[in-house]
């Protein structure tokens, strides 16, 4: 009898111990999530405080030594393997009615993922340094096969009052949502079709000056204006003098604890290669829902509309893209993108008999990041935007891309 009683006591003790262990595991998991959030907030506050202390110490110092501000240097490598149902010689001579290669002899530049087989898309050297208490300097150099390009090189003010900031040099415009981002920071390897057709592979990127003002309100509101040279010949290109002016207003709000909403309106006004006026209008919206410490859903969309006076008439063109990204954790994510040219009112007489409607493109991708500095991305694209050898061609493409970032490199916005 005593043995049975002891056995019962041991079983009950074991059951209670298991229940207590499960409860402790749940508490530990909740505390772990809370600690991760607190650590992120602490890092952000610590960085801000460190920057303030550096500025204060420099401002109060009788002498300033730049030895403490050695530049951050990073090397980015981007490469891909591509399978496509179109020969390279045909693909590089594609046309998009009224937008790319209208004359049939001026092929579009294809800096990324051009060839079936293997591509070294580029190497990028990124440099950043605090110059003094008033300026920071940035430079991005692109090295492609047989080509060297200064992608961006500019200075940025850091100590202007009233929420003002000035950028000067060569830089990518803050027009819209994606224009200012570099290719390796896109959610997809290909440029949205409407950006490709209206601005080309480099987007709006020119020498000039930028002014931005953050409105002193509880809600983030930023207004910006840019004066640029306007060498982009897809929409502008009259370089007898600086001809391009860009303006935008952007805002973001937090809805609850987990949802962030970003939006903006933009306009680019300049003169094109016919010495007539081009206006491009942009509308962008991004929603990010934080699902957990390292899990989120991002929905990003843009709509662009262009009026281009070509002397004999006005080309009216518009298009959009919308993409949905699900970030499962720090290592895995997946995404879908739809892009289309929705309006293309121009002289299409040279394309008589060819269906120029339904100019759209679909892409699905899976991404694996073993560490923040490296990324593998597998994607499939179905493209119905191109005319090749006088015929509409439905293009299927499978791509595996690899991106490596070595060295000190700033984080990209989502």
Image (cartoon, rainbow, N blue to C red):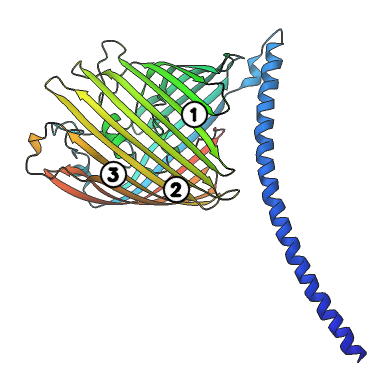
Residue 35 picture location, percent across and down = 70, 46
Q: Is residue 75 something one can see in this rendering? A: yes
- What residue would you read off at disc 1? 126
Q: CA distance from mark 2 to mark 1?
A: 27 Å
Q: Which residue reaches farthest right?
A: 2
Task: Of the two numbered discs 1 and 3 on the same chain, state the one appearing first in sequence.
Answer: 3
In this rendering, position of residue 87 left or right of residue 174: left
Q: Which mark is residue 207?
A: none
For the point 27% across and 23% down, the residue is: 279
- What residue would you read off at disc 3? 115
Residue 244 picture location, percent across and down = 32, 17
The reply to whether callout 2 and callout 1 are in contact (CB within 8 Å) is: no
In this rendering, position of residue 305 left or right of residue 9: left
For the point 23% across and 52% down, the residue is: 85
Crowding at mark 1 (Cα within 10 Å: few <14, some 14-19, many 20+):
many
Please tell me whether residue 17 is drawn above or below residue 374 in the rendered image.
Answer: below
Task: Of the two numbered discs 2 and 3 on the same chain, state the one appearing first in sequence.
Answer: 3
- From the viewer's side, name the closer residue of 366 and 259: 259
Task: Of the two numbered discs 2 and 1 on the same chain, state the one appearing first in sequence.
Answer: 1
Residue 336 picture location, percent across and down = 38, 50
- From the viewer's side, name the closer residue of 382 and 344: 344
In this rendering, position of residue 365 left or right of residue 33: left
The reply to whether callout 1 and callout 3 are in contact (CB within 8 Å) is: no
Q: CA distance from mark 2 to mark 3?
A: 27 Å
For the point 40% across and 51% down, the residue is: 365
Residue 366 picture location, percent across and down = 43, 53
Q: Which mark is residue 325?
A: 2
Q: Is residue 110 something one can see in this rendering? A: no
| Disc 3 secondary structure class | loop
| Disc 2 secondary structure class | strand
In this rendering, position of residue 160 left or right of residue 18: left
């Amino acid at each position: 009898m005593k043995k049975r009683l002891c056995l019962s006591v041991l079983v009950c003790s074991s059951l209670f111990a298991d229940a207590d262990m499960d409860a402790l595991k749940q508490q530990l998991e909740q505390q772990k999530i809370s600690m991760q959030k607190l650590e992120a907030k602490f890092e952000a506050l610590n960085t801000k405080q460190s920057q303030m202390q550096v500025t204060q110490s420099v401002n109060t110092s009788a002498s300033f030594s730049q030895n403490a501000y050695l530049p951050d240097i990073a090397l980015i490598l981007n490469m891909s393997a591509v399978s496509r149902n179109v020969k390279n010689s045909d693909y590089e001579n594609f046309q998009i009615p009224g937008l790319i290669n209208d004359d049939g002899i001026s092929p579009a530049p294809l800096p990324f993922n051009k060839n079936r087989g293997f591509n070294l898309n580029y190497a990028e050297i990124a440099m950043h340094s605090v110059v003094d208490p008033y300026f920071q300097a940035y430079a991005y150099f692109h090295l492609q096969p047989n080509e060297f390009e200064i992608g961006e090189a500019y200075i940025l003010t850091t100590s202007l009052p009233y929420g003002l900031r000035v950028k000067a040099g060569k830089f990518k415009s803050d027009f819209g949502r994606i224009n200012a981002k570099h290719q390796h920071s896109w959610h997809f390897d290909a440029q949205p079709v409407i950006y490709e057709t209206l601005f080309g592979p480099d987007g709006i990127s020119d020498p000039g000056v930028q002014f931005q003002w953050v409105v002193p309100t509880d809600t983030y509101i930023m207004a910006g204006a840019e004066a640029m040279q306007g060498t982009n010949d897809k929409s502008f290109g009259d370089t007898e003098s600086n001809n391009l002016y860009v303006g935008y207003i952007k805002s973001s709000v937090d809805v609850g604890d987990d949802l962030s909403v970003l939006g903006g309106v933009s306009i680019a006004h300049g003169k094109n290669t016919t010495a007539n006026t081009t206006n491009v209008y942009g509308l962008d919206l991004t929603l990010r829902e934080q699902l957990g410490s390292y899990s989120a859903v991002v929905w990003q969309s843009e709509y662009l509309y262009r009026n281009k006076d070509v002397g004999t008439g006005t080309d009216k063109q518009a298009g959009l893209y919308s993409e949905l990204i699900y970030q499962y954790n720090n290592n895995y994510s997946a995404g879908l993108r739809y892009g289309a040219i929705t309006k293309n009112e121009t002289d299409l007489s040279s394309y008589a008999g060819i269906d120029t409607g339904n100019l759209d493109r679909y892409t699905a991708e899976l991404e694996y990041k073993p560490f923040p500095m490296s990324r593998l991305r597998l994607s499939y694209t179905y493209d119905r935007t191109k005319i090749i050898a006088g015929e509409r061609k439905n293009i299927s493409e499978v791509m595996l891309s690899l991106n490596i970032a070595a060295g000190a490199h700033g984080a990209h916005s989502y």
